[in-house]
Amino acid sequence: MTSRTKIQSLLRHHPGEYFSGEKISHLLNISRAAVWKQVKALREEGYDIEAKHSLGYRLLGVPDLLVGAEIEAELNCRVIGSRVVSFAETDSTNVQARRLAEAGGTEGMVVIADQQSAGRGRLGRQWESPSGINLYCSIVLRPQIPLQQAPQLTFLSAVAVVETLQEVYQLPTEVKWPNDVMVNGAKISGLLNEMSAETEQIHFVILGVGVNLNMTESQFPDSLNYPATSVLLETGQPVDRLDFTCHFLQRLDLYYTEFLCEGFSPIRRRWESYCGLINAQVEVDQGINRCCGTVVGLDLDGALRLQLDSGKIERILAGDVRPIEK
Ligand code: BTN
C-alpha cells in the first residue's frame, strides 16, 4: 500500500478526527514533508482535507471514485480482491478481465471501470454503463471444479449482491432466474459469467457484475424492454460506491470460500430463499418455444426446475421467466 493510500485510509476510518502531521509521519514512518506532499496529492484527486494549525488534518469529504488501491486497502478477504485493477473507461470489464486472466491474472483479481463503452449483457444485449454512477466489475476465478458446475458461480454472485442490498440498504431484494437481481419487480443488477475451458478443465471463470447504484430515471435507455431501478431510485439516497463495492466483494469472498469447502448446496438454499417466484406460476420464453409451469427450485447445474401442468418436472436451461398474472 502506498503512503497516499495509507493516509486516505487512516482519515477515512476516523471520520471527523484530526491527525497531526507528526502523528501521521510517525505512524507511516515517513517525513512530515512527505505527509504534506501526499495530502496535497489527495486534495488534487478531490479529497476535501482540512488542515488546522494546532490540530492537524481532518477528512471532510471524499470524491466518488473507484480506485483499485483504495478498494484493496479496505478489503479483508481471503481470495477476492487479491488485486484490484481500475479503469476510468474500458470497453467491457469482462473483456478486460479475460485479457488479464489470459496473461496470467491470478484467482480473485477484480477489474472495475468507472464507465464501459461496450458493456455486455446476456444474449448479446447491451448493458448501459454511464460514467461515475454505478458498479461495473468482473472477477477472475480459477476454481478446481468440473466444467458443468461453473454456472453455479452465477448464483453465488447473485446471493452476494442480494445480501449486500438487503443488509446495507434494507432493500427488499430478490433473485430472478437466471441472472437477475430485482427490487420491487424491477431489475437492479445483472450478472454475466463467462468461462475459458478446454475439454473437462476450467482455465478461469469471469464473474461479471453490474449494479445500478446512482442511476436516475432519465439515464436508463428508452429502448429498455423491462422495468429497471437503482439504489438511488429506491431509497432516495445516493450510494457511496466504494462502500457498496467493498461490502459486496467481502460477501462474495465469504461465499466463494464456503463454496470451495462445502460445494453448491448452501448457496442453492440461499438463492431459493431469495427467489420470489418459488411456487409461482410462470411463463418461460425460450425464443421459438414457450412453456408454463410452477417454479420448484434450482437444479445442481443451475437449471431451473419447473413443474408442468402434467406434473412432469422440466429442466429449463435458458429463457426469460415471467410471472403469470392471475
Ligand atoms: C445481464 O443482465 O444481461 C447481465 C449484465 C451484466 C453487466 C456486467 S457490468 C460488468 C460486466 N462487464 C460487462 O460487459 N458486463 C458485466
Image (cartoon, rainbow, N blue to C red):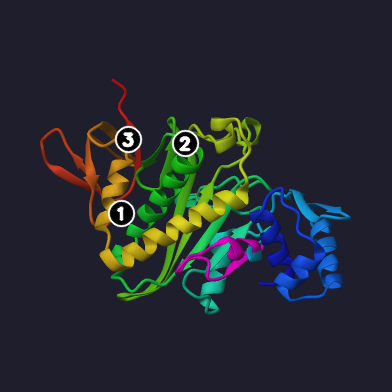
- Sooner in the amino-acid sequence: mark 3 or mark 1: 1
Outermost residue, top side = 326
Q: Could you say which disc has been placed on residue 184 in the image?
A: none
Q: In this view, does 163 lie above or below 26?
A: above
Residue 170 tag number = 2
Task: Please state the extent of the stretch shown in magenta in the rendering.
Answer: 70-88
Question: Can the viewer see residue 122 in this picture?
Answer: yes
Tag 2: Cα neighbours inside 10 Å, few (<14), some, or many (≥20)? few
Quadrant of the rendering where the N terminus is positioned: bottom right
Find residue 125 and report its horizontal and vertical position in percent.
Answer: 51, 47
Q: In this view, does 156 lie to the left or right of 13?
A: left
- Marked residue nearer the N-terminal end (2 or 1): 2
Question: Is the residue under label 1 in contact with that under label 3 (CB below 8 Å)?
Answer: no
Observer-side mark, 3 or 2, equals 2
Provide the residue designation for mark 1.
267
Residue type at mark 2 is Gln
